[in-house]
Amino acid sequence: MNSLGLPPLETLPVDQARATMTAMNAQRLPGPAMASVEDLTVPGAAGPLPARRYEPEAAGPRPLVVWFHGGGWVLGDLDSDDPLCRDLARRLGAVVLSVNYRHAPEHRYPAAALDAVAALAWAAEHAAELGADPAQVVAAGWSAGGNLAAVACQQLRDQGGPPIAAQLLLCPVTDCDLERPSYRANAEGYVLTLPMMRWFWDLYADPEDRTSPLASPLRGTLGGLPPAVVVTAQFDPLHDDGAAYAQALQQAGVPVTHLDARGHTHTSLTMVGLVLSGEPVRAEMVEALRRVLPARVGV
């Protein structure tokens, strides 16, 4: 990636940063084949949201994973996490519903968070129609998507919304504090950088809003949340975000499995078919998730 000589994303106008990310994603290997892949819309907080449903070959009834993509609330779309969603659907034998929430700076905080809450609630209520077991709904996401999944679980708990069986948080953003040791140790050189995270936060939320649990779920009330699988990467500015959230969940009495991926970066675990050392980590992640899901029931 360094040999390409690309300017740092945070130095580009947002539309150019998005175009650069799209061009880079076009060079990826495709993920596993699915029995079917369907584009649809789901209700958001302010209108319909694009979504994509992945159905694996596995026989039902299956878990439903509601997935929120990464990209710092600014970048990304239904295509950006496509290989990862396919990989997750195949490994878990689950229907994966990837939801494309509203993005900053066009739609600043709390638009993305409110979209995630609405989409997760709708998916949980319509799991059977989506071909999945309503008792096995998982809120999941990577990076900023992990932030949205965590926020949505807290909000649905507080609102008395439909039950969520588990959380899967892959290298999540959980707090606005950029002074944690991993931000300093991994500030440069590992694709996601400290300047990029500052850029994302500045585009997403004003400083006075960032400490709200709607933006920083680590600062929310954590008791009574679904069991969680939290994955962190050693060379990731967000490492300590995820580790702190896993520890706080455990202290609040929430069952937690924390997987710390030695040698990995923020993006390497998502590079399906390219970074081969990510495969056993994703396999362990799925096995940990399978252990916390309830027994399957008929749809």
Image (cartoon, helix red, strand yellow):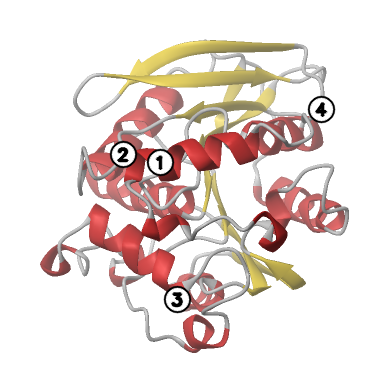
**Residue 248 numbered mark, or none:** 3
Disc 1 to disc 2: CB gap under 8 Å: no
Q: Which residue, given by chain and number where applicable, does mark 1 sit on? A: 16
**Please, what is the three-letter code of the amino acid marked with disc 4?**
Pro
> What amino acid type is highlighted by mark number 3?
Ala
Say which residue label 4 marks.
32
Depth order, front residue of 121/161: 121
Please give left or right for residue 175 compared with residue 146 in the image.
Answer: left
Residue 137 visible in image: no
In whole angstroms, how far apart are the C-alphas of marks 1 and 4?
A: 29 Å
Q: CA distance from mark 1 to mark 2?
A: 15 Å
Q: Closer to the camera, 232 or 160? A: 232
- Foreground disc of the pair 3, 1: 1
**Apparent side of residue 193 relative to residue 120 in the rendered image (left or right):** right
Instruction: Using the numbered discs, state the Cα–Cα distance from disc 3 to disc 4 in whole angstroms.
Output: 35 Å
In the rendering, which numbered label is found on residue 156? none
Between the C-alphas of marks 2 and 3, the distance is 28 Å
- Quote the CA–CA distance across marks 3 and 1: 38 Å
